[in-house]
Image (tube, rainbow, N blue to C red):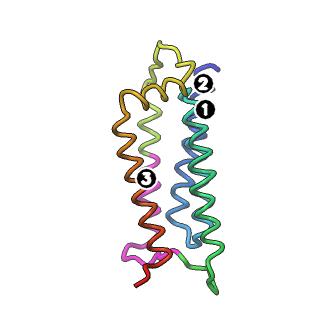
């Protein structure tokens, strides 16, 4: 792809990410917010593809979109509630039009700065075999950090199970 196609694709994916993230915040319905969060994750994976990080794009789709966002949507939809309208609490002291105006101004200024910034592409080629490189780093240089993260996640999972099941006296 040429440079113009990369730039156009970047602005399309960036627009999807910013618009869906903004929609997550301003939507009153929690299910709609969760679906917009899934769309935001898909846009981020598109940005990863543009960065030639195909493995991270696949992980973004599989883990974030396929697991976290969908479980959030299903958990929200399966909750026994008589009504789901107005589930996001939007009662604040700041009027929504002011928030929309400030957010829109921020997006316009950010896009203006990005459009005037000269892009310099790296002359280094893309890494061809990223999964094996990541596996080598995880299993050698960062093994202790990965084991600490695994123990922390295990403790969080056990705590969530105990809280959900309830402790018998």
Q: What residue is at 49 percent from the left and 23 percent from the top?
A: 133
- Which disc is residue 8 wearing? 1
**CB-based contact (under 8 Å), mark 1 and mark 3:** no
The kind of secondary structure the magenta stretch mainly shows is helix
- Give the farthest residue toward the front: 169
Q: What residue is at 60 percent from the left and 54 percent from the top?
A: 67
- Which disc is residue 132 wearing? none
- Which disc is residue 105 wearing? 3
Badge 3 element: helix
Snapshot quadrant of residue 81: bottom right
In the picture, the quarter occupied by the C terminus is bottom left
Q: Is residue 144 left or right of residue 128?
A: left
Q: What residue is at 52 percent from the left and 55 percent from the top?
A: 21
**CB-based contact (under 8 Å), mark 2 and mark 1:** yes
Read off the magenta span: 88-108
Q: CA distance from mark 2 to mark 1?
A: 6 Å
């Amino acid at each position: 792809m040429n440079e113009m196609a990369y730039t156009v694709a970047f602005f399309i994916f960036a627009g999807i990410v910013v618009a869906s993230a903004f929609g997550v915040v301003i939507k009153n319905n929690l299910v709609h917010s969760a679906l917009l969060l899934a769309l935001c994750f898909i846009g981020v994976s598109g940005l990863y593809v543009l960065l030639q990080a195909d493995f991270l794009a696949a992980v973004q789709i599989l883990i974030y979109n396929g697991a976290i966002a969908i479980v959030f949507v299903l958990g929200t939809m399966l909750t026994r509630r008589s009504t789901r309208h107005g589930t996001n609490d939007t009662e604040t002291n700041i009027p929504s039009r002011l928030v929309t105006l400030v957010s829109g101004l921020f997006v316009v200024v950010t896009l203006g700065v990005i459009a005037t910034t000269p892009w310099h592409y790296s002359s280094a080629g893309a890494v061809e075999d990223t999964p094996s490189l990541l596996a080598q780093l995880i299993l050698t240089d960062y093994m202790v950090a990965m084991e600490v993260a695994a123990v922390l996640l295990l403790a969080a999972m056990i705590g969530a199970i105990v809280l959900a099941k309830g402790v018998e006296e």
